[in-house]
């Protein structure tokens, strides 16, 4: 933890080297003491050496995923404020990340200002004016997550979802209902 007058410590965990270094540079320019990790194992090792006050964790990485990193960081230091970043946003993973100790959840692309705003929102009282996604939106996100996990194979996704392939194709053709 930083002493008064010292820069806050921040850990950036992302397997995308370009994104990670760009984000780390943006935080350094804002006065943060930044450490970078390319995967979950590296992130947890760095956190064991010196627990960060803030952490930005990518959800999908090779090896231990973002949820494992959130769990590990929270076990090392429950006061670490963690924002989970992902290009595959869904309500289910957001809820799971929050349950494991994340303070906020953002979809990519996000920049340093978005992340600072998320950390600031996490400090204050919970926002009750946040729109709740509709059931149709949640269903659409779930279907697309299963389809992505199946590598785009509609027949396999339909089997996993318990739907007829044509029914799934009709659902996929629809746009998600606005939040």
Image: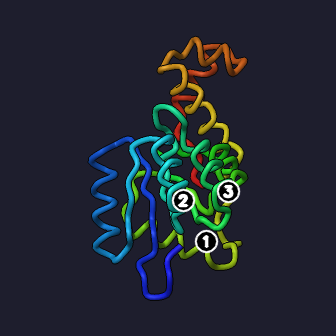
* Up-down relation of residue 61 to residue 114 (above or below): above
Image quadrant in which you'd find residue 26: bottom left
Residue hosting label 2 = 83
Determine whether the residue tagged by mark 3 lies in a helix, strand or loop: loop
Real-space Cα distance between discs 2 and 1? Answer: 9 Å
Determine whether the residue tagged by mark 1 lies in a helix, strand or loop: helix
* Up-down relation of residue 84 to residue 78 (above or below): above
Sequence-wise, which precedes: disc 2 or disc 3?
2
Q: How many marks?
A: 3
Q: Nearer the viewer, residue 18 or 142?
A: 18
**Disc number for residue 146:** none
x and y percent of residue 75 in the render?
68, 53
Q: Residue at x 43, y 67 (%)?
A: 114
Sequence-wise, which precedes: disc 1 or disc 3?
3
Please state, as top left, top right, bottom left or bottom right, where the C terminus lies in the image: bottom right
Residue hosting label 3 = 101
Q: Marks 3 and 2: in contact by CB < 8 Å?
A: no
Q: Nearer the viewer, residue 139 or 93?
A: 93
């Amino acid at each position: 933890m930083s002493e008064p007058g010292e820069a806050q410590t921040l850990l950036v965990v992302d397997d995308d080297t370009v994104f990670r270094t760009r984000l780390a540079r943006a935080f350094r320019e804002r006065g943060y003491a930044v450490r970078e990790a390319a995967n979950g194992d590296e992130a947890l090792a760095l956190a064991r050496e010196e627990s960060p006050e803030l952490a930005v964790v990518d959800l999908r990485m090779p090896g231990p995923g973002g949820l494992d990193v959130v769990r590990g960081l929270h076990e090392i230091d429950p006061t670490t404020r963690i924002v989970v970043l992902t290009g595959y946003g869904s309500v289910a993973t957001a809820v799971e990340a929050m349950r494991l100790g994340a303070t906020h959840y953002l979809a990519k692309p996000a920049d340093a200002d978005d992340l600072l705003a998320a950390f600031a929102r996490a400090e204050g009282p919970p926002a009750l004016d946040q729109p709740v996604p509709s059931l149709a939106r949640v269903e659409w996100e779930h279907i697309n997550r299963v389809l992505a996990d199946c590598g785009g194979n509609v027949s396999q996704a339909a089997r996993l979802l318990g739907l007829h392939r044509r029914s799934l194709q009709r659902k996929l053709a629809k746009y998600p209902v606005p939040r």
